[in-house]
Image (cartoon, rainbow, N blue to C red):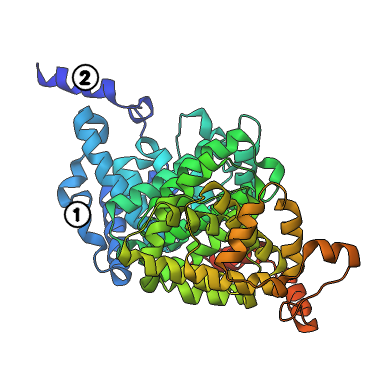
Amino acid sequence: MTSLSRQLARLKDAPSSAQGIERNYSSLLFNKKEAASIDRGQAYKLGLTGLAQLKKIDPTIDEWEPQLFAQTSLDFNRSMITKEENEKITSSLERMITVLAPYFHHQACKQVLEWLIYKYQINTFDAEFLAVAFLPFHDTNSYGRLGSILMIKKNDWNWLKEVTKDGAPIPFNFITRQCLIAGGNMHLIGAVGNFLTNLTKNFDEEYLTKNYQYYFLFFTKLIASLFEDPANATDQLISRVIPQLGLALKSKLIPFKIAGMVLITQLSMAATFTPETLFPIISLLLNKVKPSIFSTAMNTLIVICQHQSLEILPIKPIRKLINRREELGLDDFFQKTQLEADLAGFLKPFWATLLNIYNHGVEDEDFSELMAIFDVTTDATKLSSRQATDLMTLVIENLNENANIKIPKTLQRNLKAVILRFGQEFDVIRSKYLKKNEKEICMLIEQCQIQAHEIGDLELEKKRKRRRRTSSTKSVEDIQEGSENKAKKLDVSLFVLSIKYTLLFSDKFC
């Protein structure tokens, strides 16, 4: 093939906009007339000046893709290279754009971008990547200017060209509406999520935590805003969001994982899910959770349980959690949380899971850990009336389904205290189960070593409409305490907002 033939073949693969006789005078910093007067030497010098300024902030920034700023790049013509060469330069440019993204507020960053636009035509070849990379800065004039020069051919981005045609910034609620309108731009959800996923693949945790907090915050803000109105929680939208939340919860990067926690909390309050959907989410939430974010993960699980109908939790992650009891400080977490909130919605499926683990047998070294969790979560003095009812009912049903299983001694001791403290609730349960589960009621009373005079005779009490008890009678203080516990139901909205507003109004993001 002759030299002319090779050049014609390369032109065939180049975008039509890059083949015009007249040079494209797109510019981030200059108007068309000013941009037309700039030659390649001036554009190159401007890029190097910006890079030198950014180096004062990030000393390693010129080490990422040095070939993009080499003297030899002055004679580079992107429209004249092969498809394979273009893929290589695209990878290099996307990496450099990603490194530049945190500094978009700086004039130096715009100077570097000006060189990349001039020489590599990134506003044409890499337009969609630019739009996503700098999207968190949507409400700045600079992003409006950038949007006005991007040449994205995909119809999904037509809205961007329209709203930024005069270089105006984009209000956040406009982006939200674009995601929600019928046939709208749900691709934005995937685009932002994929950008974050690629970040976690290409940079280490320290670098990401230092430089990209703002993008994790934007991701959280965008997804959360879609579900502020529960009416928006359609199957179509949820199907777009769930995979992104899965990636976030699976991530080892703490900011990304916390973003997933906040969002699944919000979503669990806006929509109802089946256990088949929730179990993988809970497994990702608890899998290899770091001690530094364990409390946040557990609070997320509590909110999920309080707003969804779960009879039991996934066995494997709960078993692993118990085995890490001391490392994660499980005892301290439960003791503190039970004092601050009513965990009724969570404790019932959690206890059911513990009983299931016990029924299937545990190794000797794990038995003490399981009993310690039973002990700390079934303390009668910390339970509300509803929690006590749930616990007693679960144990009776467990005895009914597993006749050969004996209640562990730790639970026997605590159950006795619960039954005596919540006598009226126990009588309601006895009257419900006495005919069909009388054997299990007797087994419970026998195994907990409760004497007849401590609980009284149910039939006698029905006739006289009074209780005949000794130590089991509730005091006025007990009743008041139960009322306080009921009033202390975990205010999940405060949990969500405390994290969300911390994220959205952090100095780094602003």
Determine whether 102 is above or below 59 in the image: above
Query: Looking at the image, is mark 2 or mark 1 nearer the viewer?
Result: 1
User: Which class describes the residues within 10 Å of circle 2: few (<14), some (14-19), or many (20+)?
Assistant: few
Q: Is residue 507 visible?
A: no
Residue 90 lies left or right of residue 126; in this view the side is left
Determine whether 138 is above or below 210 in the image: above
Quarter placement of the N terminus = top left
Q: Which residue is painted at 72% across and 67% down in the image?
A: 385
Three-letter code for the amino acid on which mark 1 is drawn:
Pro
Residue 433 % position (x, y): 70, 52
Q: Which residue is painted at 74% across and 52% down in the image?
A: 432
Q: Residue furthest right?
A: 464
The one nearer the camera, 69 or 271, is: 271
Pointer 2 or 1: first along the chain: 2
Residue 352 % position (x, y): 54, 55
Tag 1, which secondary structure?
A: helix
Determine whether 106 is above or below 32 in the image: below
Which numbered dot is residue 8? 2
The one nearer the camera, 269 or 164, is: 269
Q: Which residue is mark 1?
A: 66
Three-letter code for the amino acid on which mark 2 is drawn:
Leu
Residue 399 lies left or right of residue 146; in this view the side is right
